[in-house]
Image (cartoon, rainbow, N blue to C red):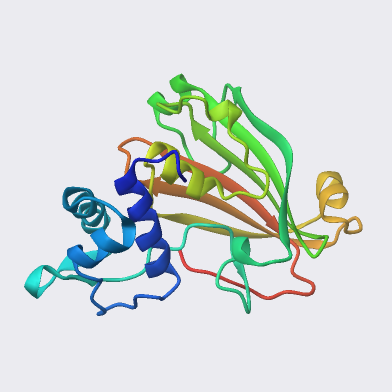
Amino acid sequence: MSELPKYKQIYEVLRKQIAEGVYAPGDRLPSERSLCTACGAAHLTVRKAIGELLKDGLVVCGQGKRSVVRGAPKGIGILSIIGTTSALNHAGLSTQIICRPELRTWTEAFSFPLEAHEREAGCIYLERLRLLDGAPVFFDVTMMPHIQLPRILDCDLENRSLFDSLRMQYQIIVTGGTQQFFAIRADKRMQHYLKVPAGHPVLQLNRRIDTNRAGFRIYSQLFCVTRKYGLTGTF
């Protein structure tokens, strides 16, 4: 995070504190003067960081120049495992890259239609396997248009969140989306990655994820094995 501009570093710290409930809806953030002292930053830098929070709808202007928390960031990641705040924050959860980001052509995005500009731009394609305490729980395929994503093919996503990387490196923030749920039986690929027998029930989610960048959507197909873990999440 040290590679980010100072105002972005402050923004990320405050955003994380809001997401984790350090500051709940209705709470006031520290004053700009306090943040300047705590962060070792100039007043304009702190004000710019708070401006980003305002733009994202995470805070609103309150009395006395104290920003008031409006709410936590939208849930954006894979479904969380019951008992954790986020699957990616679980101490025993790891990510194995099956297919590193690569450029492909595409004509469809799972069950969702593509716009013409998405097809023309080409597809950034990747596959990941999520394991909890060494046992596979999620297998997901992600596709997104190759639009204004410099060096995305070199992005290291081993045990990292794709959504956090997109936000921090490209200022792409999830604003909502659509999910479709299917009950399927494990094919050979699912048998191999999720370590289940042929025909074992698997939950499949097809997702179209909207972002703050006009014309940029992320498409995801997620397969879950839930024999031991319940799933929960917001979207």
Which quadrant of the structure image shows residue 116?
A: top left
Residue pictured at 63% horizontal, 79% vertical: 83
Which quadrant of the structure image shows residue 158?
A: top right
Q: Is 62 placed above or below 153 here?
A: below
Q: Is residue 107 visible in the rendered structure shown here?
A: no
Q: Quadrant of the C terminus?
A: bottom left
Residue 92 locus on image (x, y percent): 74, 65
Residue 9 locus on image (x, y percent): 38, 50
Residue 68 locus on image (x, y percent): 21, 72
Q: Nearer the viewer, residue 48 or 165?
A: 48
Residue 89 locus on image (x, y percent): 60, 64
Q: Nearer the viewer, residue 146 or 83?
A: 83
Residue pictured at 26% horizontal, 62% vertical: 37
Q: Nearer the viewer, residue 8 or 84?
A: 8
Which quadrant of the structure image shows residue 141?
A: top right
Q: Is 67 placed above or below 119 here?
A: below
